[in-house]
Image (cartoon, helix red, strand yellow):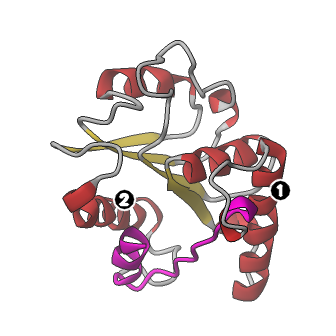
Amino acid sequence: MAFADAVAQSGLVVERMDFPYRLAGRRRPDPPAVLEATVRTRAAELAHRLGVSSDQLLLGGRSMGGRICSQAVAAGLGAGGLVLVSYPLHPPGRPERLRTAHFSALDVPCLFVSGSKDTFADPSELESATRAVPGHVTHVWIDGADHGLGRHVVNAAEAVVRWIEETFSPHVPGTR
């Protein structure tokens, strides 16, 4: 929650969502189809509430939430861009289990914010994998941070706000 709050302090509209398994108090994630359907539904609800189309929204999240948003966009959900914080490229210690099959369908601007010590993707692995993304890709590395970002959350949030301002101003309400 601290990350979303830090981004929202910039004046941008930030909407957090929880997947059904989290709302039910379960630890095991729902099947990918349920997770992606949840993203599509929540994006449509947010776009309706804001009076915009979904392709005017920036979607994303941290870790699995960001991965699922990217999969939904790759499957056809309209979005203006993706903000992927601590993208889980592969399970720790399992670099052969890449979560990138959908990258070639991401034709939107993508921001990847990751810690330099993230065991789910080191900088060289993530930079190599994201070459498959046809949309413009920006990487921000938070020096010394791991997958959870820890005390670096504010730095990561500032990087997201800066990227949004540089990439989308003056088109994004709330940016300078």
Up-down relation of residue 80 to residue 85 (above or below): below
10 Å neighbourhood of mark 2: few (<14), some, or many (≥20)? some
10 Å neighbourhood of mark 1: few (<14), some, or many (≥20)? some
Of the pair 52 and 49, the residue shown nearer to us: 49
Left or right of 104? Residue 77 is right
Question: Of the residues tagged 1 and 2, which is closer to the observer?
Answer: 1
The circle drawn on residue 163 is 2
Residue 126: image x %, image y %?
41, 28
Sequence-earlier tag: 1 or 2: 1
Of the pair 168 and 79, the residue shown nearer to us: 79
Up-down relation of residue 158 to residue 132 (above or below): below
Q: Which residue is mark 1?
A: 37
Quarter holding the C terminus is bottom left
Q: Secondary structure at mark 2?
A: helix
Residue farthest along the top direction in this orientation: 96
Q: At label 1, which amino acid type do we have?
A: Ala
Q: Quadrant of residue 158?
A: bottom left
Q: Secondary structure at mark 1?
A: helix
Q: Residue at x 61, y 47 (%)?
A: 108
Q: At label 2, which amino acid type do we have?
A: Trp
Range drawn in magenta: 1-21
The circle drawn on residue 169 is none
Up-down relation of residue 112 to residue 81 (above or below): above
